[in-house]
Amino acid sequence: MIFASIPSPSQSLIEIGPLTFHFYALSIIAGVIAAVYIGNKRYVAAGGKPGVVSDVAVIAVPAGIIGGRLYHVITSPEQYFGTNRNWVEAFYIWQGGLGIWGAISLGFAGAYFAYKRNLRTEKIPFAVFADALAPGLLVAQAIGRWGNWFNKELFGRPLDAPWGLEIPIQYRPIGYSSSETFHPVFLYESLWCLVVALILVTYVKSKKLKPGSIFALYVSLYSLGRGVIETIRIDDANLILGLRLNIWTSVLLLIGSLIYLRNLNLRSKTGIE
């Protein structure tokens, strides 16, 4: 018998007059605000101009949201296309479904474009800018994951423990109707993001690493945790050789970012630029 557990919220939105506010969207907005604030503080400390991070965010944030949604829809087309499916729901971002890899990829591209093309007077390399953003992005992800809690999604296998997440029967996957509590995957990832952010702003700053290294470490450490967390999930997903697509993506990004990090700093030590 479970004597304690994490309850699911009784509602996922709030209505004020004619306006409807979805907690999932509010979580994302809160995360963006945190990322811009932290990124700006770190960028200014690195010698950058105040306000640059906010200017870049105007392009990077929408690009990230579009990228995240595209990744989700492309990797889960059965949710929106086919018999008895409404393709219009592919645009219902407030219902959940933002693939982090798509968000990071397109968001990063948008940030690079904004920084290089619209802010040509800035003298600081983009790699320094990216390093300044990395911890704030992790905090944003940590906050944004609580939107999944409000939507009663992103949970894992059944779990009989005090930190088990209560999931109403209508939200449980087929075959799990008799289970009441599950691994709170959203919480695991949120905590992991905060741990990685702490690592980046404490341990890493004492090391003599080349610009771009902190962002590479962000990608590698997040990928490591995400790959492990993916093994707990039970929601439908595309499989490759029996493994979830996101596990393969995490492994490839982990390896790629570590190779980049090694080569980047190896060149520095050997004097090769």
Image: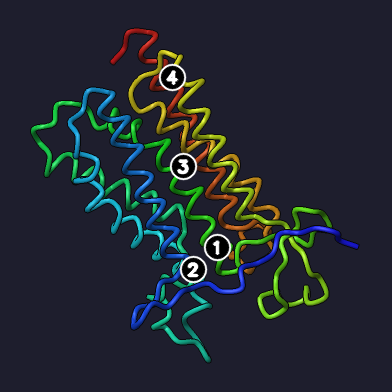
Q: Which residue is under mark 2?
A: 96
Establish if 143 lies above or below 132: below
Q: Which residue is under mark 4?
A: 205
Q: Which residue is under mark 3?
A: 138
Q: Secondary structure at mark 3?
A: helix
Q: Which mark is residue 148?
A: 1
Q: Are marks 2 and 1 in contact (CB under 8 Å)?
A: yes
Q: Are marks 2 and 3 in contact (CB under 8 Å)?
A: no
Q: Secondary structure at mark 1?
A: helix
Within 10 angstroms of label 2, few (less than 14), some, or many (20 or more) residues? some
Q: Are marks 4 and 2 in contact (CB under 8 Å)?
A: no
Q: Front-most of 203 and 273?
A: 203
Within 10 angstroms of label 3, few (less than 14), some, or many (20 or more) residues? many
Residue 73 position within the rendered picture, expressed as x and y whole percent measured from the top left: 45, 69
Q: Quadrant of the N terminus?
A: bottom right
Circle nearer the N terminus (4, 1): 1
Within 10 angstroms of label 4, few (less than 14), some, or many (20 or more) residues? few
Residue 27 position within the rendered picture, expressed as x and y whole percent measured from the top left: 45, 58
Residue type beneath disc 3: Leu
Circle nearer the N terminus (3, 4): 3
